[in-house]
Image (cartoon, coloured by chain):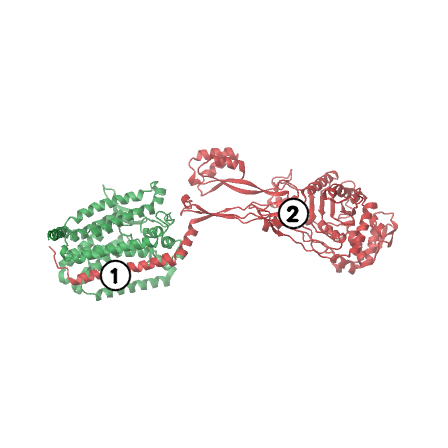
Chain colours: A green, B red
């Protein structure tokens, strides 16, 4: 009897202080694994360019530290605290994007997508801020609109809200992938908020139809059409005959994946990272993982992401209120979209576009904002009462 | 505070999202499976092609050995010194050492060391000892690669026969060209891994495909006889201030050439050297023509009018056809009238009445013309062709010249008469030796050749070369009669300067006046063989344009005599009277 009582007491204590250690562990594992792979993929090039093999590793490590600190802070703040900043966040995102055109903007690899934060020496990608703010803003809006979100009018309104920022990102920073991600997050959130399926099935089908028509038009007009995106489509369909142009990166990634085989060449043994795959530590890091760790390494990474999504699904479905659930759904959508698109690009399943692999790819602002989002999820998880599980 | 309930449909939708995403990730997993299992070979092969850089390793070229195994053409290890710009740590030290060791100007070396390129060659054909010394400095970025260079230990010995090789060790002339297939071997490769900038990745190691060395070629030349023949030719050339002297020594039974000399020879280790006093500003074309002249082998590349040595062929044809016997009688008044042409004998007073043996001993033109006319054009031409004179001998050297002969339909009695004593047509010296061999060896036309067999590195025979023999050119009887007649020519006739005390020698002299007639330019020659009753060796000496005495019997016969005096005992050919 005494033992039973003490167990019950223990459970009660746990209920008061629930913390999703599984989620935290998965995130920490992905971060640690990412750091190892960044070092492996970038050390050769880093040494060539900066005489410091750990150049990229160090920068990423600092970003991870800051990110983890921010995550712990956010996790310990009740998530309803952020409600009041939703409108502000939306406006800030709207204003930050055009800042890249000012002298604060930083250009890197031919794209002007970053702004320098004065005094800190860190570069910030406004698109990352916008993703987080959009999740928060839409979660608040879904709750505020209540049942009206379920009608056609509510649906259209919800769909219209992210558009200004999406267009800004697409037009000003010429960043199609971030625009797609933000739009995707929004669609997923509205999908959850609305009990309807038909509209979304229709939307999905029409999106597929539009894309199919575009691809068909590009292929049939081919060559003379030119343009940067249509060339990418052609390179996607036949990377080997565009190996010197747009197909180079994709083809090199395929070489890396193909030469990995089942067991891989072993950690650090990649040949393709020796400048063959451009920016191996960045968007294409998954190809180096496959080359070094083989099919099993690739599967392990995919499984880790599925587990991460599963944890977030559990949290979303047990969230104490709709706001918490919507926040988690937003974060879940963000990570899911980016993971799927990244692996699809690397395996040449879809045309090449710059999307990083969450937690693993090199990129300071990306990892920091992802950790803040995880902080939000953990904060929601904390409010879950164990008996409901 | 927002606290709308988390409805059932919300949960269902989150579930839908999760399973949707998981399904997509599983699809990508399938794609990965396809790429990494089904396409793995395809992509890893493409990737390897991209990563590997090939460096070839030269195969050692096969050596050329004489009949006793003496090496006539060998390989010398030489080094190529190069620098790799990216790997140089101390350029000044590198420049300093390379200037000193390679004896190059600082300006030359500096330009190459400072040039930004993946690999820059500083000097090739560097002596191995110098290469080793440079390697010992262990300079970062300096590469010393070993390489083979053809080396001829006897410099100009049999230069026009052996030939030499070019920059890639490929044969340029001579046997080096003909036996390229056996000599060249197969180059190996070193495959190294490089990054996208072409820099070698040291940890990745390298794959080697070992080269296969070329086969050694055994030839029938005897270095001692070749050397001696070359000395005799040079002496004669100097003594008679001749333009050239050629000597061919062959085994008439099987066509193996024991020596082939054509002075002036050239240094095989420096084949591109122009004669001294050549003006430096000649065009490339003129230079090439000059070199082609130097490399030309008169024994096979050039034709000449054989003159009286050709009477052997006329005589053999006559005997074979039965229009003459050794006892047949001929009268020589010092000339003969053919149609409307009066053709003189070299003895203007005439040889008077003589039998056929003496006509040959006297090298009497009217007698041989009579014989030729007796044979008639059709028959003579038929024998000319039957003896193989209109085809090439098939010797294993490049560029054999063909016979220059009248067309049958253009020939009249005058042409037939001149051909009968060896004028108005041209053949190569090797053609004469081959044809005379077939007449004295019992009627077998052999193929003159050098190549005997090819050996692999362990000395195993890879290939024994075989050459066609045409039998029955003349009957054994005719052959025997010819040997007797020719022995008489040397013993008591015009060829007595070719006689060697104690040996039975057969032979025939010739003194051919070159075109235009009356220029006073002659080619003196003598063809001799021993032993006369069973020929084991046949030798032809040709002296081009001697000054002073120009008779074959006085200029060329002594060369063959001296040669035979020395080589017959050496070859183990016994004196007949022992």
Chain designation of label 2: B
Name the quadrant containing residue B13. Answer: bottom left
When asked about the image quadrant of residue A52, the answer is top left
Q: Quadrant of the C terminus of chain B?
A: top right
Foreground pick, A140 / B458: B458
The answer to whether residue B553 is left or right of residue B392 is right
Q: Tell me residue A342's x, y (percent).
A: 30, 55
Q: Secondary structure at mark 2?
A: strand
Residue A35: horizontal and vertical position, in percent? 29, 46
What quarter of the picture does the N terminus of chain B occupy? Answer: bottom left
Q: Which mark is residue B349?
A: none
Q: Residues within 10 Å of mark 1 (few under 14, many from 20)?
A: few
What residue does disc 2 label? B219
Q: Secondary structure at mark 1?
A: helix
Q: Which-is-in-front pick, marks 2 and 1?
A: 2
Residue B321, above or below B128? below
Q: Nearer the viewer, residue B540 or B533?
A: B533
Q: Which residue is mark 1?
A: B20
Which comes sooner in the sequence, label 2 or label 1? 1
Q: Is residue A5 left or right of residue B364?
A: left
Query: Label 1 marks which chain's residue?
Result: B
Residue contact at pointers 2 and 1, CB within 8 angstroms: no
In the drawing, does residue B297 fall left or right of residue B26?
Answer: right
């Amino acid at each position: 009897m005494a033992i039973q009582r003490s167990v019950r007491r223990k459970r009660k204590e746990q209920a008061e202080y629930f913390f999703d250690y599984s989620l935290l562990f998965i995130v920490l594992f992905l971060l640690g694994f990412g750091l190892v792979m960044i070092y492996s993929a970038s050390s050769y090039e880093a040494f060539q360019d900066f005489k410091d093999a750990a150049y990229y590793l160090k920068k990423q490590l600092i970003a991870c530290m800051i990110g983890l600190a921010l995550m712990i802070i956010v996790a310990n703040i009740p998530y309803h605290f952020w409600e009041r900043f939703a409108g502000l966040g939306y406006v800030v995102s709207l204003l930050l994007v055009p800042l890249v055109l000012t002298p604060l903007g930083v250009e890197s690899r031919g794209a002007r997508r970053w702004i320098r934060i004065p005094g800190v020496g860190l570069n910030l990608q406004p698109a990352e801020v916008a993703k987080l703010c959009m999740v928060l803003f839409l979660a608040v809006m879904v709750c505020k609109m209540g049942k009206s979100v379920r009608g056609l009018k509510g649906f259209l309104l919800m769909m219209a809200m992210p558009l200004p920022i999406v267009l800004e990102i697409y037009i000003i920073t010429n960043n199609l992938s971030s625009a797609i991600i933000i739009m995707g997050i929004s669609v997923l959130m509205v999908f959850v908020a609305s009990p309807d399926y038909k509209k979304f099935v229709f939307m999905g089908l029409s999106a597929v139809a539009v894309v199919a028509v575009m691809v068909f038009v590009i292929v049939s007009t081919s060559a003379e059409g030119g343009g940067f995106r249509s060339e990418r489509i052609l390179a996607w369909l036949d990377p080997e005959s565009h190996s010197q142009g747009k197909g180079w990166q994709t083809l090199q990634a395929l070489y890396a994946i193909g030469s990995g085989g089942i067991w891989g060449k072993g950690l650090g043994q990649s040949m393709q990272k020796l400048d063959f795959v451009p920016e191996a530590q960045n968007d294409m890091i998954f190809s180096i993982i496959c080359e070094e760790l083989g099919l099993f390494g690739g599967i392990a990474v995919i499984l880790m992401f599925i587990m991460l999504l599963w944890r977030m699904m559990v949290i979303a479905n047990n969230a104490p209120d709709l706001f918490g659930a919507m926040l988690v759904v937003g974060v879940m959508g963000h990570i899911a979209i980016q993971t799927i698109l990244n692996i699809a690009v690397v395996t040449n399943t879809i045309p090449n576009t710059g999307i990083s692999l969450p937690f693993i790819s090199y990129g300071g602002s990306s990892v920091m904002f992802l950790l803040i989002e995880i902080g939000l999820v953990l904060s929601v998880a904390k409010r879950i009462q164990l008996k409901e599980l | 505070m927002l606290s709308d309930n988390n409805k059932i449909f919300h949960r269902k939708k989150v579930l839908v999202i999760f399973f949707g995403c998981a399904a997509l990730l599983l699809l990508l997993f399938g794609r990965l499976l396809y790429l990494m299992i089904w396409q793995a070979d395809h992509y890893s092969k493409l990737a390897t092609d991209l990563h590997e850089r090939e460096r070839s390793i030269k195969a050692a070229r096969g050596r050329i050995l004489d009949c006793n195994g003496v090496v006539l053409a060998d390989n010398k290890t030489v080094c190529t010194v190069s620098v790799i710009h990216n790997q140089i740590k101390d350029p000044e030290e590198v420049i300093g050492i390379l200037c000193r060791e390679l004896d190059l100007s600082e300006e030359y070396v500096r330009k190459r060391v400072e040039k930004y390129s993946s690999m820059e060659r500083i000097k090739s054909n560097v002596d191995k000892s110098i290469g080793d010394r440079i390697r010992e400095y262990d300079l970062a970025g300096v590469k010393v690669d070993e390489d083979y260079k053809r080396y001829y230990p006897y410099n100009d010995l049999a230069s026009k026969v052996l030939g030499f090789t070019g920059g890639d060790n490929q044969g340029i002339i001579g046997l080096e060209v003909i036996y390229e297939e056996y000599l060249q071997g197969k180059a190996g490769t070193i495959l190294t891994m490089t990054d996208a900038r072409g820099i070698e990745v040291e940890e990745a190691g390298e794959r080697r495909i070992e080269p296969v060395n070329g086969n050694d070629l055994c030839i029938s030349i005897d270095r001692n006889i070749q050397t001696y023949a070359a000395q005799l030719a040079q002496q004669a050339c100097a003594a008679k201030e001749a333009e050239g002297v050629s000597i061919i020594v062959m085994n008439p039974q099987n066509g193996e050439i024991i020596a082939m000399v054509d002075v002036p020879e050239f240094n095989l280790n420096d084949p591109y050297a122009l004669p001294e006093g050549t003006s430096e500003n000649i065009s490339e074309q003129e230079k090439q023509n000059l070199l082609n002249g130097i490399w030309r082998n008169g024994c096979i590349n050039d034709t000449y009018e054989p003159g009286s040595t050709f009477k052997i062929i006329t005589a053999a044809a006559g005997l074979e056809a039965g229009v003459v016997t050794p006892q047949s009688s001929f009268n020589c008044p010092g000339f003969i009238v053919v149609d409307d042409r009066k053709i003189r004998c070299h003895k203007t007073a005439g040889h008077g009445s003589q039998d056929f043996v003496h006509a040959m001993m006297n090298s009497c033109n009217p007698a041989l013309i009579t014989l030729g006319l007796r044979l008639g054009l059709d028959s003579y031409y038929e024998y000319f062709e039957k003896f193989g004179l209109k085809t090439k001998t098939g010797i294993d050297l490049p560029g054999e010249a063909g016979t220059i002969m009248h067309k049958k339909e253009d020939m009249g009695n005058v042409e037939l008469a001149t051909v009968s004593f060896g004028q108005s047509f041209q053949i190569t010296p090797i053609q004469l030796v081959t044809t005379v061999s077939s007449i004295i060896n019992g009627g077998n036309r052999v193929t003159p050749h050098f190549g005997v067999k090819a050996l692999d590195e362990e000395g195993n025979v890879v290939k024994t070369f075989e050459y066609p023999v045409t039998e029955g050119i003349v009957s054994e009887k005719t052959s025997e009669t010819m040997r007797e007649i020719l022995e008489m020519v040397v013993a008591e006739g015009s060829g007595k300067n070719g006689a060697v005390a104690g040996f039975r020698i057969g032979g025939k002299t010739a003194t051919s006046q070159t075109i235009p007639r009356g220029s006073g330019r002659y080619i003196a020659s003598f063809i001799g063989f021993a032993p006369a009753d069973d020929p084991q060796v046949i030798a032809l000496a040709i002296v081009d344009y001697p000054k002073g005495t120009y008779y074959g019997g006085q200029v060329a016969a002594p060369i063959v005599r001296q040669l035979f005096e020395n080589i017959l005992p050496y070859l183990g050919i016994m004196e007949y009277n022992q």
